[in-house]
Structure formats: structure tokens, C-alpha cells
């Protein structure tokens, strides 16, 4: 497959000079400044979805991404200019470690303080190759879930995932008080729509998918490994129903996915106290390297919902 052949919107704008003129931008040698200008247009004018396609084209042609920046959380304006608006991931070191959750949240803490609360969790995952898509679920108490987690060495059969109604449970809403987000970066109305809790044993895998929001994955307990693929390599990711990939837990080892090897993969380890900014449209696969507790946060103060 030709790496420059994506879909019609990109092919239509593949002439760099015409593309610049069509949006009345002056020529610049600073690609990042151009991406910043384009991303601002995307953020504040949702109807110009084609701009997003052109950002992907420019990233691929002039700025192929091969690593993830590791940073201390910068001031509001620097984070948005250098990462959020440029659609660039970043590993962040000083966000989670100041939270009460970082010192409190362990499996035993949930067992002892919220054991009788009911949760909806994904189960029977090992029987269903499309478990991320089909989302089989059951209801269980936290006490039962933690005991189930403690009874296995590693498993991908069950998982409390972020897309669940856990925080609608009035018994669990107090958990949000343990998450202290910078007010200049995030709004204060945290709820089950913009915060997801992930709890599971070593061995759980969330297969390659993309989100239609920008997220920060915050590791509170245990370790995870995240594999990222930039949006411009979407042609090699075998998309299914827009947000999912057909590529399963074993990756692209099957002959069914021969082009997957062409996608540039970036692998990040995430330890307790670290966070990863995952921009909208980035493919990501997440594997728990130990028993794990994480949250995902999308409560940014700027517009954060995109049709992909």
C-alpha cells in the first residue's frame, strides 16, 4: 500500500502549496506553528473537519513522530500550544503524585472502604475475540471483584473498564474528591462522563482503538504498557466501525493483517504516579503489566468532542 494514499480528503489536498493557499496561510518553515494554526481552526470550528485530515497529511509528510516527549506538566498555555493543539502525545510526571488517590487507592482500599458497592464489569473476554466491541458485562460487588482479581496470577477474562456507570453509584462518587486536577487545564465538574476508572489484574488488554476525545491516562497503582500509532498510519490499522481495529491481542502477527507492520509503533511504559496524554485520533493498545488501577480524564476546559 502506498503510504501517501489515505482517503479522498487527503489526496485532494496533497499539493502542499495549494493547501496553504486554500486556507490563506503564509508559507512557514516552522511546521509546528502551521499545525498549531490548523488545530486552532479545528478546535474552534467543528465544521472544518477536513482540516483534521490535512493535519494528518502534514504530520506524516514533514514531521513523522517516532517518540513521545516526557515532561513535567507545563503551564496551561504551553500544554495546549505544544501538545493539545498539535495532536502530540506526552508522558507527564508531576500530575498524579499530588493526588490523595495516589497514596490511598489500592485493591485493599477499595475492598475495605467500598466492598459492598456494585459495579458493572466486562467478563467472558477470553471467549470473545471482539470483546472490546461486544462488551459483555455483569454486575458484581467490589468485594467480589477484588477477590476475583486476587485469585488469578494474570487474566484477560474480566476487567472494570472506563466506559462503565461506576461513578453513577452514589457510594462511589466520593472517589472523585481524591483526584485533584489543575483548574487552569481541567474544569471542575468531574463525573462519569469525563472520568473513567479502570481496575483489573495483570494481563488485561484493551486492543487498538481510537477515542473521539483527548484523554489523559493516569496510572495510580501498578504498571501498564501502551502502544501508540499516529493517526496518519490509520490505513494500516484495519479500522472497524470507526473507532475500533480488527487487530486483536496478538497484534499483527496474523496473515490477515499484512499491512500492520507498516504502521510506526511507539511503546510507552507507565508506572504508578505517571500519566500519558493520548490525543484524539491516536490508536492505542493498553496492557496491564501487574494488578492495576488507572483513571482516564477528558474534562479539559476547551472543546473536546470530535467526529472522526
Image (tube, rainbow, N blue to C red):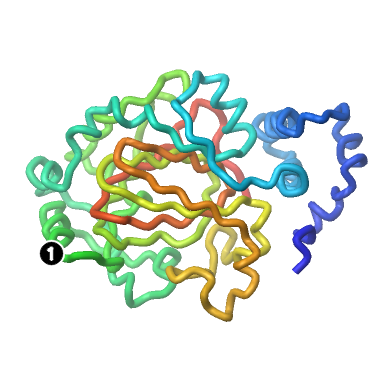
Image vertical order of residue 96 relative to residue 242, above or below: above
Give coordinates of residue 114: x percent, y percent.
13, 43
- List the residue tagged with mark 1: 151
Q: Quadrant of residue 296?
A: top left
Residue at position x 61%, y 67% in the image: 261
Residue furthest to the bottom: 255
Q: Bin the neighbour count of mark 1 within 10 Å (Cα to Cα): few under 14, some 14-19, many 20 and up.
A: few
Residue furthest to the left: 112
Residue at position x 29%, y 40% in the image: 272
Image vertical order of residue 6 relative to residue 61, above or below: below
Residue at position x 57%, y 66% in the image: 240
Q: How many marks?
A: 1
Q: Nearer the viewer, residue 209 or 229?
A: 229
Q: Nearer the viewer, residue 51 or 87?
A: 87
Give coordinates of residue 108: x percent, y percent.
11, 46
For the N terminus, the image quarter is: bottom right
Q: Nearer the viewer, residue 146 or 262?
A: 262
Q: Nearer the viewer, residue 124 or 139?
A: 124
Q: Quadrant of residue 8?
A: bottom right
Give coordinates of residue 282: x percent, y percent.
57, 49
Image vertical order of residue 157 relative to residue 50, above or below: below
- Name the secondary structure under disc 1: loop
Give coordinates of residue 194: x percent, y percent.
41, 38
Q: Quadrant of residue 112?
A: top left
Image vertical order of residue 299 relative to residue 77, above or below: below
Q: In the shown orientation, is residue 102 left or right of residue 39?
A: left
Q: In the shown orientation, is residue 123 left or right of residue 37?
A: left
Residue at position x 45%, y 62% in the image: 207
Q: In the shown orientation, is residue 307 left or right of residue 31?
A: left
Amino acid at each position: 500500500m502506498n503510504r501517501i494514499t489515505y482517503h479522498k480528503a487527503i489526496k485532494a489536498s496533497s499539493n502542499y502549496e495549494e493547501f496553504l493557499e486554500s486556507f490563506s496561510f503564509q508559507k512557514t518553515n516552522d511546521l509546528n506553528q502551521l499545525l498549531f494554526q490548523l488545530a486552532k481552526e479545528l478546535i474552534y470550528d467543528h465544521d472544518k473537519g477536513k482540516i483534521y485530515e490535512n493535519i494528518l497529511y502534514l504530520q506524516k509528510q514533514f514531521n513523522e513522530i517516532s517518540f513521545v516527549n516526557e515532561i513535567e506538566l507545563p503551564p496551561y498555555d504551553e500544554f495546549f500550544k505544544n501538545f493539545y493543539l498539535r495532536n502530540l502525545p506526552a508522558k507527564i510526571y508531576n500530575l498524579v503524585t499530588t493526588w490523595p488517590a495516589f497514596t490511598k487507592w489500592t485493591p485493599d482500599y477499595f475492598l475495605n472502604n467500598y466492598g459492598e458497592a456494585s459495579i458493572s464489569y466486562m467478563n467472558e473476554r477470553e471467549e470473545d475475540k471482539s470483546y472490546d466491541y461486544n462488551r459483555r458485562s455483569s454486575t458484581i460487588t467490589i468485594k467480589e471483584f477484588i477477590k476475583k482479581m486476587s485469585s488469578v496470577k494474570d487474566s484477560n477474562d474480566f476487567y472494570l473498564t472506563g466506559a462503565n456507570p461506576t461513578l453513577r453509584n452514589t457510594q462511589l462518587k466520593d472517589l472523585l474528591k481524591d483526584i485533584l486536577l489543575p483548574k487552569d487545564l481541567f474544569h471542575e465538574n468531574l463525573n462519569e462522563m469525563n472520568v473513567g476508572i479502570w481496575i483489573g489484574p495483570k494481563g488485561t488488554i484493551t486492543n487498538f482503538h481510537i477515542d473521539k476525545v483527548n484523554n489523559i491516562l493516569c496510572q495510580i497503582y501498578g504498571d501498564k504498557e501502551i502502544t501508540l500509532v499516529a493517526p496518519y498510519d490509520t490505513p494500516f490499522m484495519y479500522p472497524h466501525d470507526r473507532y475500533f481495529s480488527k487487530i486483536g491481542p496478538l497484534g499483527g502477527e496474523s496473515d490477515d493483517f499484512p499491512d500492520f507492520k507498516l504502521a510506526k509503533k511507539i511503546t510507552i511504559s507507565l508506572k504508578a504516579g505517571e500519566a500519558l496524554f493520548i490525543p484524539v485520533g491516536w490508536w492505542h493498545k493498553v496492557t496491564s503489566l501487574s494488578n492495576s488501577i488507572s483513571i482516564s480524564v477528558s474534562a479539559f476546559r476547551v472543546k473536546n468532542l470530535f467526529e472522526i
